[in-house]
Amino acid sequence: MRLDRFICKHTEHGHQQAKRLVASGRVSVNGEVVTNLRAEIDRFMCVELDGRRLQQQQSHYLMLNKPTGYLSATSDPQHPTVLELVPPELRTNLHLAGRLDRATTGLLLLTNDGLWSRRITAPEQKIPKVYHVTTAEPIHLDAEACFAAGVWLAREGIFTSPAQLERISPCEAHLTIYEGRHHQVKRMFAAIGNAVTALHRESMGSIRLDPDLAPGQYRPLTATELKQG
């Protein structure tokens, strides 16, 4: 929202008076005087008029090392959710930027900034997501070529986007996908006659899971990670 319109909405002043207030340097945004009427204001900016605070809401961007057994949900009547791993004072308006199923572990991002989360989860962005996969049987030698060509998902009636498989051991691999379809990794391996016994997300885009975070622990994203996301 433009600054002059923001002043109109959050005070008793009309449009012309709002313009004069901004132009005269009586409005500050995040502690700095702003005289540009067209300056864009989002809901996480601190806006003050003559020292009176009109808006202040802190944004949160968290990295969580999800343990197994927790649902990627804000609430559930039967199972513990990942939000229960975060202190109550941080939970307000938090949502998940990309889910993991209950048995899957690893990198999970939580935020109260919907614009940011949509940017990193929108399918058209094709953000790479890297998983460490453990399988029940040795991975077929032709799995790399199969995943690179795309795997047929009968439920949706489509092929997956090309994915990269990097074999670590006979029953372990890194898999990079660019989508987030329901149980996609498990279904891709099922399509080549194998079963996933453990799945761990290591990264989303340039944001990698902090190796110092134990399962169930979280920390705020760094400024660099926010820019990468």
Image (cartoon, rainbow, N blue to C red):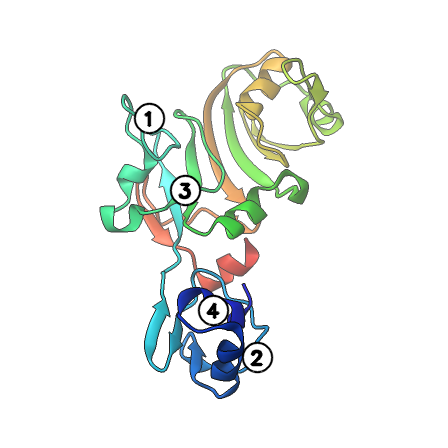
Q: Which residue is mark 3?
A: 95
Of marks 1 and 2, which one's residue comes earlier in the chain?
2
The residue at 68%/26% (across/down) is 160
Kindly tell me whether residue 122 is visible in this rendering: yes
Of marks 2 and 3, which one's residue comes earlier in the chain?
2
Q: Quadrant of residue 217?
A: top left
The residue at 44%/45% (across/down) is 109
Disc 1 and disc 3 in contact, CB within 8 angstroms? no
Q: Amino acid at mark 4?
A: Cys
Element type where label 3 sits in the image: strand
Viewer-nearest of discs 4 and 3: 4
Crowd around label 4: few <14 · some 14–19 · many ≥20 (10 Å): some
Q: CA distance from mark 4 to mark 1?
A: 48 Å
Q: In the displayed structure, does residue 198 sit left or right of residue 148?
A: left
Q: Amino acid at mark 1?
A: Gly
Q: Amino acid at mark 2?
A: Asn
Viewer-nearest of discs 2 and 3: 2
Of marks 1 and 3, which one's residue comes earlier in the chain?
1
Q: CA distance from mark 2 to mark 4?
A: 15 Å
Q: In the displayed structure, does residue 86 sit left or right of residue 162?
A: left
In the rendering, which numbered label is found on residue 69?
1
Q: Nearer the viewer, residue 226 or 29?
A: 29
Q: CA distance from mark 1 to mark 3?
A: 18 Å
Q: Position of residue 74 (x, y in %)?
A: 35, 35
In the rendering, which numbered label is found on residue 8?
4
Q: Which residue is mark 2?
A: 36
The residue at 52%/15% (across/down) is 195
